[in-house]
Structure formats: structure tokens, C-alpha cells
Image (tube, rainbow, N blue to C red):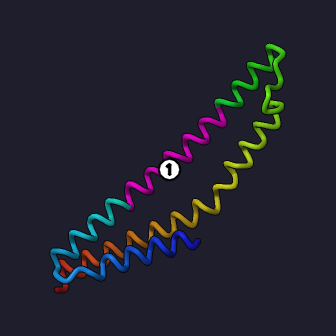
Amino acid sequence: MLRGLLYLGIVVGVLSVASTPFETVLLAGLVELYAAILYNASLLAVTADANNHAAFVRFRTLATALGVTEDESGTYVEQEKALGDQINGYNTRLIIGEIANALVSFYAIYKIVRAVFFS
């Protein structure tokens, strides 16, 4: 939560520095581009983790068929549960990140509209 507030505070600070409509549009556009890249990167990371979990489940199934049920890190069932618990723990952080990203995007769009139409 603190990271989201810090992100929003930095964006508000950066956009308040702009003194002309051109600077406002340029900085808000850069903020909007960063927000889009950040959002897509976070979605790709979550998708990669989910795919890794699915691949581990498939590996465990094949290894069990061959009679291999553990390695030096423990049993595959325990490892799968730990990985699943870690992925399930992302939910709260993802929601907070998405809310912070949405607030930043709305603020940047507000600044663009205000600079273009009301200056």
C-alpha cells in the first residue's frame, strides 16, 4: 500500500512541476506510457508464475508415474503446495498495484485534458 501511495505521490509531484501546457502533456504522456508498461509487465509476471505452477504440476504427475516423488528440496507435493500458496499471496498486492496504477492513469489523463482544453 505504501508503494502505491509513493508511486502516486511521485507522479503528482512530477506533473505539478510542468509550467506550460506542452510540458504537462509531455510529462503526463510519459507517465501514462510508464503506467501501461508497468501494468503489462505485472500481468506478464503473474501469468509466468501461473504457467510455472502448471508446468510443475505436469512434471510432478510425470515424475510420480516414474516412481520419483521427491528431490533434495522435499516432496513434489509439498513444493507444489508452497508454490501455490506463494502465487495465491499475490492477490492483495496485485489489487493494490492495480488501484494505484488506475489512480495514476486517471490523474495523468486529467492533466492532459486540462492542459489541452482548459488552458
Tell me the quadrant of the picture where the N terminus can be found: bottom right
Query: Disc 1 marks which amino acid?
Result: Leu
Q: Is residue 50 magenta?
A: yes
Q: Residue at x 39, y 62 (%)?
A: 35
Residue 79 in the figure: left or right of residue 12: right
Tell me the quadrant of the picture where the C terminus can be found: bottom left
Task: Please say if 28 is above or below 66.
Answer: below
Residue 102 in the figure: left or right of residue 17: right
Residue 112: percent from left, percent from top: 25, 75
Residue 25: percent from left, percent from top: 21, 72
Report the predominant secondary structure element of the magenta stretch: helix
Badge 1 density bin: few <14, some 14–19, many ≥20, Cα 10 Å: few
Q: Residue at x 79, y 25 (%)?
A: 71
Q: Nearer the viewer, residue 68 or 118?
A: 68
Residue 8: percent from left, percent from top: 44, 74
Residue at the front extreme? 72
Identify the image quadrant of residue 33: bottom left
Task: Please say if 55 is above or below 9.
Answer: above
Residue at the top extreme? 66
Q: Secondary structure at mark 1?
A: helix
Residue at the bottom extreme? 119
Identify the image quadrant of residue 39: bottom left
Q: Residue at x 43, y 51 (%)?
A: 40
Q: Is residue 72 magenta?
A: no
Residue 4: percent from left, percent from top: 52, 70
Residue 56 in the figure: left or right of residue 75: left
Specify start and end residues of the magenta stretch as a single range: 35-54
Q: Residue at x 57, y 73 (%)?
A: 2
| Circle 1 residue | 43
Q: Nearer the viewer, residue 14 or 118?
A: 14
